[in-house]
């Protein structure tokens, strides 16, 4: 390479090296400024969401404190701390320059009560998240769990199916939610038994003339699959029994296409 060509390359290389050093030095200085300057000390912590979780509990769980550096705050750790609160489904923690932290969360929404020794609120995913205080059920449907022993696992899939069944009852053309006294989920120790049992008021509320008939509660057993189809079938059976003046003692739906109805003598 000729001297006339190599000299410019050498000059450019030297300037490039100086530029890289300057860039690295500037990055280090900027990071030092951002993480040590009093300007970025946290002065305000706001729980933006108004919900069932108390603001002081949210603040404590987040681990955020005034005076901490805004850029040294680990947002993921703070979010994970807030999400440990039972009434928080998921949360977010964000920085607002120069010194504010905002915490938002989506609250848990209880859709049913799980009876497992004690009572627990259940969310839509079938996850128990908070023990129910006395008088705090708020008219929610109850899912009872029957287990062969205390060591037997709670059948999570059956609990989710029970929630699905409760949702189907809300859209029933014959039953209202007050007709559904409870749902029982049986554990794996009950081999050969129906995995779901409901206690239903008979005759159903929307049966013509039902207000003039005495009410009784009837156990109905269910399979885990095709719950909507089973509900349609029990609606037809219940309506036919009421119109015929017959009182069922038991309705079994878990036997496939066969429906077994035991009536009072």
Image (tube, grey):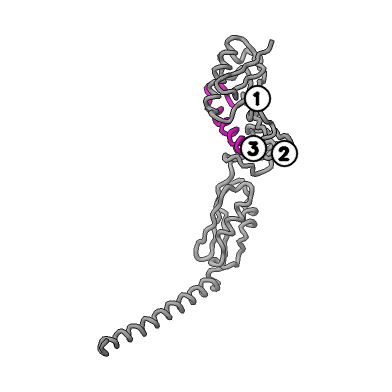
Tell me, for residue 177, which label it has, or none: none
Q: Which of marks 1 and 3 is nearer the N terminus?
A: 3
Q: Which of marks 3 and 2 is nearer the N terminus?
A: 2
Dot 2 falls on a residue whose secondary structure is strand
Which image quarter holds the C terminus? top right
Task: Give residue 110's position: percent from left, percent from top.
Answer: 60, 39
The answer to whether the residues at label 3 and label 2 have Cβ atoms under 8 Å apart is no
Task: Give residue 10's position: percent from left, percent from top.
Answer: 33, 86
Magenta region: 154-177
Tell me, for residue 155, which label it has, or none: 3
Tell me, for residue 199, which label it has, or none: 1
| Number of the front mark, 1 or 3 | 3
Q: Residue at x 73, y 41 (%)?
A: 151
- Number of other residues with Cα within 10 Å of mark 1, as a class: few under 14, some 14 to 19, many 20 or more: some
Label the magenta part by its dominant secondary structure.
Answer: helix
Answer with left or right where residue 191 lies relative to residue 106.
right
| Image height of 105 relative to 94, above or below | above
| Image height of 49 relative to 28, above or below | above
Dot 1 falls on a residue whose secondary structure is strand
The answer to whether the residues at label 1 and label 3 have Cβ atoms under 8 Å apart is no
- Number of other residues with Cα within 10 Å of mark 3, as a class: few under 14, some 14 to 19, many 20 or more: some
Task: Give residue 51's position: percent from left, percent from top.
Answer: 59, 46
Dot 3 falls on a residue whose secondary structure is loop
| Image height of 242 relative to 182, above or below | above
Q: Mark 2 points at which residue?
A: 118
């Amino acid at each position: 390479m000729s001297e006339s060509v190599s000299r410019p390359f050498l000059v450019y290389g030297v300037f490039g090296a100086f530029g890289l050093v300057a860039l690295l030095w500037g990055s280090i200085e900027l990071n030092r400024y951002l993480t040590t300057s009093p300007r970025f000390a946290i002065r305000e912590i706001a729980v933006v969401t108004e919900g069932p979780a108390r603001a002081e509990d949210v603040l404590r769980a987040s681990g955020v404190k005034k005076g901490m550096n805004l850029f040294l705050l680990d947002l993921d750790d703070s979010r994970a701390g807030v999400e440990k609160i039972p009434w928080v489904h998921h949360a977010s923690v964000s920085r607002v320059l120069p010194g504010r932290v905002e915490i938002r969360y989506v609250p848990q929404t209880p859709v049913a009560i799980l009876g497992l020794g004690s009572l627990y609120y259940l969310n839509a995913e079938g996850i128990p998240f908070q023990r129910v205080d006395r008088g705090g059920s708020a008219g929610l449907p109850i899912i009872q769990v029957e287990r062969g022993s205390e060591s037997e696992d709670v059948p999570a899939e059956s609990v989710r199916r029970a929630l699905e069944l409760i949702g189907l009852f809300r859209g029933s053309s014959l039953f209202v939610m007050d007709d559904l006294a409870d749902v029982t989920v049986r554990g794996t120790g009950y081999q050969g038994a129906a995995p779901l049992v409901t206690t239903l008021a008979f005759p159903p509320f929307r049966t013509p003339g039902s207000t003039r008939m005495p009410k009784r509660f009837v156990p109905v057993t269910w399979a885990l699959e095709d719950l909507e189809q089973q509900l349609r079938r029990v609606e037809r059976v219940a309506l036919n029994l009421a119109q015929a003046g017959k009182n069922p003692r038991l309705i079994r739906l878990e036997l496939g296409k066969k429906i077994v109805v035991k009536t009072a003598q």
